[in-house]
Amino acid sequence: MMKKTVLYIMLIFMVVFSSCSGTKYLPQNEKLYTGASIVLESTDKVNKKKLKGIISKAIRPAPNKKFLGMRPKLWRYMVAGENPHTKLGIWLKEKGEAPVLLSSVKPGLTSEIIDARLFNAGIFKSYTESKIVEKKHTDRVIYISHVHRPFTISSMVNDISDDSINKIVLEGRKKTLIKPGKDYDLDNLKLERSRIDILLKNNGYFYFNPDYLIFKADTSATDHTVSLKLTLKDSIPEKALTVIRVKNVFIDQNYRLNDELAGEVKDTIHLGDYIFLGKNTEMNIRPGVILRSLYLKKDEIYSRQNHNITLNRLMSLGNFKFVQIKFSDKDSTNAGFMDVRILMTPMPNHNFRAELDLVTKSNNYTGPRMNLSMINRNTFRGAELLDINLAGSFEAQLSGNDRTLYSYSLNPRVSITIPRFIAPVRIKSSSSLYIPKTTFSLSLDFLRRVHYFDMRTFKFTYGFKWKSNIMNEYELNPVNIAFTSLRNQSATFLDLLASNPFLKKSYEEQFIAGIDYKFTYNEQLVSRKEFQYFIQTSAETAGNIFSLAKTIGGSNPSSSDPSKVLGSVYSQYAKFSVDVRGYYNIGVRDKLAARFYAGIAKPFGNSSVLPYSRQFFSGGPNSIRAFRINSVGPGTTFQDNDKVAFLNLGGDIKFEVNGEYRFNIFRFLNGALFADAGNIWLQKSNPSRTGNPFMLSTFLNEMAVGAGIGLRIDVSFFILRFDLATPLRKPWLEENQRWVLNQINFASPAWRKENLVFNIALGYPF
């Protein structure tokens, strides 16, 4: 019976969608254009893939979109009729796609465009013909291009009449894009002109234009080669051949467009070679802070590079909505000079933000979270960013065995970020587009786990952030201190620690004083890139200075007889991790995303176990989503969240891979299909015997695997994510029973309760 029902559904589906081709409603004597094919004819050896790519960009128009061999958008458009009057008809028309008819195709003109594209790629003697392949209701076109191997560049010489410009071009010739032996390519010639234009603008030729450069080609040789000569256009404005210098630099850090329209004349204050507009009392930021970001200087030759550095550094201060740089010529008595006006529109100095969230975790704990933040963007008139933050949360299990358990936290934090390096030794700031920043951060985290313990954590961080370009970011914290103490430990908690020496040791060693470094390479900031990569590496070490001091003092710190600082055992360890992500953009809105994460940490010297806050964890909304938060591992260990509500075991090693296909459903609503795999392990040297230690020969067999589907509400500034996942492989089961695909049973309430994990989170997981 079931098989017959499925068969009937399939037949109905085929009958309904067979009419979705749209050809039924075509105008009389018209045929639907279904696309074009490309055929290459050549007696030479040519790169057919490259040439077909060039030709395909010249073929117009694009046919109607197809899905599973059908054209549902065309069908919707056609079935709605010429002038629909109903809401359904209007909706079908708007969501449909007008037919692309053969009468709109111009094969002869397209053939000419193809030959022009091929000519630009060095195939100067191609010719293209076309023929139409007819069917009952549709036609397609075949373009046959007769091609030869592309001409190659034999030589490139400069014949620039202006000696100064010629000298600059020759000095920068090492970076030329035009090299003998390469195929002729018009696009490459255009890029070379732009490169030279930038070079000239960095040497004062403010009014120069790449169109003033001309490449003359000689194809008289019989061996498919072309020689190029670079010359200047015959008629060029005199200003374009004049080196421009900066005369006066005017700075307005309180610029308003309305003031300029009203013709307001501001007071001026001369500081060295710079002129500030406005009264001294109107300067929110001290002039010296602004001057550190100015690379356009009086009487110096104009440089586009210095122009961009100035613009970007002023914007990266974080105090201005807009920054403009305007130029104006001096009078005829000062030919070759121009004035510079730097106009900055300030942001409000103070900002207050209050957030209230409802947080639901994958371990069934739910509760509100509050975050209050007050920001001062110019605390001491030096563009210092002061952030005073107070966060608090409450969470409890609304159902299950632990409904009487709850926890709450209070987290005050204050940080100040200064737009320069602040260090005991002088650090030379490079002429980067981005301003380096120094941050001092102080926080106190109070956490109460009812029926377990109270935890107080004091943190202090002193560090630097800087960027060498838009993709490379660095972070160094030479001082990173955390001190954690436990109070009001319950008998239940003490019994739990007594039964698990590894967990007990993790909580004992909670004084951390170390240094950490992070490097991030992010291509997502580069738009219109088909493949984008994100790489982040981090390294951290702690306790070494204390151990060195103890050793110099004559003692020998060890984990069996640990030394103390301020009455507490200090942690000593090294930790390293790498996070690699790849994004393949499919069209405008769809994307394939993948992540690889690996981390390793090693306690040594004064420690035998990593502090709890520095261990690796796996499972949860940003990890393996088919398992509850921090519940995977170590190794083949099964962590029963029903028995231990708040505490999870961590590891010394972590390995994780994730894959996700993201697709658009409707406007701001996106969907996802994903799979995750990974685990954490302890090292062989770890005194705990929890799970199997990490071994290269067995770790792949101990991976947890899960998969699921997701919905995302993406309104650009806010992304709310819903993920539903189920385990496919459980590493704690017997070795030959870990794959649980055969146990999937969505109809069973018991299976759903045990195996379906629902995650709600903000932002994408990676």
Image (tube, rainbow, N blue to C red):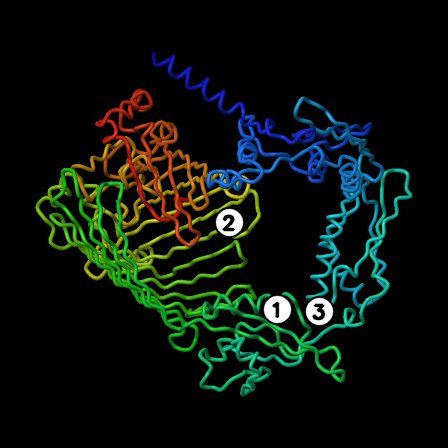
Q: Left of 630 or right of it: where is 351?
A: right
x 76%, y 38%: residue: 110
- 100 or 271: nearer the viewer: 100
The answer to the question of whether label 3 and label 2 lie on touching residues, with beta carbons closer than 8 A, is: no
2 or 1: tag closer to the N-terminus: 1
Residue nearest the observer in this picture, 187 or 172:
187
- Which quadrant would residue 28 be assigned to in this image? top right
Helix, strand or loop for disc 1: helix
User: What's the residue at 64%, 34% (across, down)?
Assistant: 63
Q: Residue 183, percent across and down? A: 77, 42
- Which quadrant: the N terminus? top left
Q: Quadrant of residue 307?
A: bottom right
Label located before the other in sequence (1 or 3): 3
Residue neighbourhood size for the residue with mark 2, other residues' Cα within 10 Å, grouped as few (<14), some (14–19), many (≥20):
some
Q: Circle 1 sits on which residue?
A: 307
Disc 2 target residue: 524
Mark 1, other Cα within 10 Å: few <14 / some 14–19 / many ≥20? some
Q: Secondary structure at mark 2?
A: helix
The amino acid type of the residue labelled 3 equals: Phe
Q: Is residue 60 found left or right of 560 in the rendered image? A: right
Q: Position of residue 722 (x, y in %)?
A: 34, 41
Residue 17 at x, y percent in the picture: 50, 25
- Amino acid type, mark 2: Gln
Q: Is residue 311 above or below residue 699?
A: below
To which quarter of the image does residue 764 belong?
Answer: top left
Amino acid type, callout 1 = His
- Residue drawn at point x = 63 percent, y = 30 percent: 26
Quadrant of the frame with the C terminus: top left
From the image, tell me which residue sits under label 3. 206
Badge 3 marks a residue whose secondary structure is: loop
